[in-house]
Image (cartoon, rainbow, N blue to C red):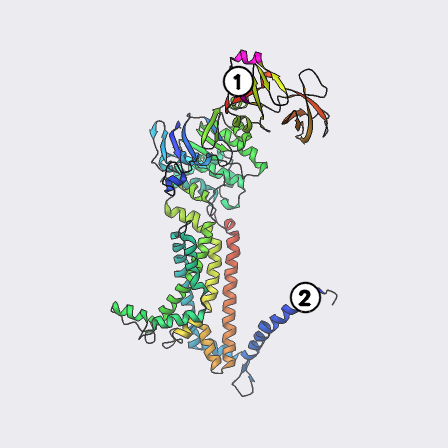
Amino acid sequence: MKNRAWLFLLPALAFMAVSAIIPLVTVINYSQNYIFAGSMPTFVGLENFVEVLQDPQFLGSIGRQFIFTFLVLLIEVPLGIIIALAMPKKGNWVPLNLVLLGIPLLIPYNVVGIIWRLFTQSDVGIVPAAFNGLNYAYNVTLNSGDAFFTILTVDVWHWTPLLILLSYAGLQAIPNAYYRAAAIDGASKWSTFKYVTLPKLRTVLTIGILLRFMDSFKIYSEPLLLTGGGPGTATTFLSLFISRKAESYELGYASAASLIYFFIVLVMSYIFFQFISRVGRGVHDEG
Amino acid sequence: MAKLEFKDISHSYEYSFGTVKDRNKAKWVINDLNVTWEDGTANALLGPSGGGKTTMLNIISGLLRPTEGQVLIDGRDVTDLSPQQRKIAQVFQFPVAYDTMDVYNNLAFPLRNSGYGQAKIDKKVRETSDLLDLDEYLSEPAGSLNEGEKQRISLGRGIIRDDIVAMLLDEPLTLIDPKLKNGLRRLLMRIQRELKLTMIYVTHDQHEALTFAQYVSILNEGTVVQSGTATELYENPKEPFVGFFIGSPGMNFVDCNLKGGVLDCKGFELNISHKLQEKGVESEGDMKLGIRPESIAVSKEQQEKTHPFEIQVIENFGHYYILTVEGCNSRLKVQVSSEMDVSKGEEIYLSFPADKLILFKEKKRIL
């Protein structure tokens, strides 16, 4: 090799190989075999994929995953914008607000899961107690709806602050002249929001939506700790479903499902990427 | 169109927001202003940054409510009305175009907000875009235009409303590319004349103010120091600040003492007794002498009534030089033709024509 620059890339390449490339190749390899612990793998080609795609449980968890992610975005994005708009722009309360909003973001996923598990436990939890007060028999381990919406609530509680902070930063960056011009032009509050605020927030919102999409699509710790994926399969999201399969030593099946999962994330990320770059050009496309 | 008036306007942000409760401790950005802008005139507010210019403009347009005083439009008190109710248009330093709309819809925006019909809107948009040379961009997205074009859109959103009483411009050219500046300034002047708009133009750039406006008000520390035409301000500054602010470079000032018709400048003396007599000035004592760099006569040879100075700095402005000279306990700026051969450290001889001298006593002009 003439170019010694490659030497400097070696550590990074080695790290990548160990952390990403080798596992990925292994998974691709596994996905083409029937493997059960202890026995020799048998090559079956694409049979695992056919099996996965015909498995109602897998399809069910995909559907659940899309509904969950869709609801997460539908709630967190508008909520984030509304709260950011309501926050004070300057003054002594700003730092306090920002710190308080940052707290949920700093808590690790598994701790969040445990906190909410305590909150929702049917004997001592505050959530069932509160619902009892409203004459609703809340039970996260028996009622599928309760379980699903509890996980959703946890995600909203945990991650809306991210969108608030992003929107808040975006709002601060909008030059005052825009609002003044809108006032001079006699724009209503709604028009001002629609033609000034929202377009100017587009870039940060796209980043926020992308992050929340990818993250909520990978949700794992919260259902694992809170509901264990139940009751039934009500909170068995994709990653939980796949890890269950791997835990029961169906490695070929789990690998095939992982690759399909990976493919979905890849395609969706590509779509979002296209969307982001269109936001950059957005001004040219519209009109 | 209309006549605009300020009646005893004072403004303090601190006092208005209530962060400072004591009237005397609050910082007042504008102090007891009484100004009138006549109908259909081009006016400028000129002053250094932080002098209260933009605050004044926002009070006129209604974006800001003054702490004290009244704003009158054609004699009617509009202090409590919103910008839209006052029917005032304003263009900002930062060119504002609504990026998600095309140029057509940008221009139509204020009309839509006032509930105009589509036929009327279409007619007005065509007229306005024609006036501003924006016709070819009408279907372009506003976000793809350059700053100069965006500023034309801002202007267009103002003049498209046929009910506006005045147009306010807050340093509209500051952020515009130098190449586009001249064209935009000419456009502004043309529009002012064609539409007979009452325009108030805020700037810290004296060239912009003096070329654009018929009447210029010099603003400093919240008060109007002097108002007048460009020539009046240049030739007859009432305070040292105006002399210093108008002209580039500004007027030279020398501390001196007047006694018995002789001005003692602590290094050279000037006899101005006949000038004092002519003008009937009897004051004596500590003064400030003001003279413009272009009024000082420069010679390379010592003559009668000349004073020796040494050249410290030479700045080349093309067809003239600005020399910074030192001597006779003073440091002055002098303008000379670039045909004159000068070099750093050289000795030159200055004389001060009596009819170009201006005297200030305690910041007020006496001669």
Q: Nearer the viewer, residue B281 or B245?
A: B281
Q: Chain of mark 1?
A: B
Q: Percent from the top left, x then y, of residue B326?
A: 66, 28
Q: Nearer the viewer, residue B52 or A185?
A: B52
Q: Is residue B275 magenta?
A: yes
Q: CA distance from mark 1 to mark 2?
A: 82 Å
Q: Percent from the top left, x then y, of residue A190?
A: 37, 48
Q: Nearer the viewer, residue B362 or B160?
A: B362
**What residue does disc 1 label?**
B284
**What residue does disc 2 label?**
A8
Q: Is residue B322 visible?
A: no
| Quadrant hosting residue A160 | bottom left
Q: Is residue A49 magenta?
A: no
Asked if residue A132 lies left or right of residue A227, the reply is left
Q: Percent from the top left, x then y, of residue B352?
A: 63, 19
| Residue A160 vertical position relative to residue A89 in the rendered view, above or below | below
Q: Percent from the top left, x then y, of residue B217?
A: 47, 27
Same chain for marks 1 and 2?
no
Q: Which residues are magenta?
A: B273-287
Q: Secondary structure at mark 1?
A: loop
Q: Quadrant of the N terminus of chain B?
A: top left
Nearer the observer: mark 1 or 2; the answer is 1
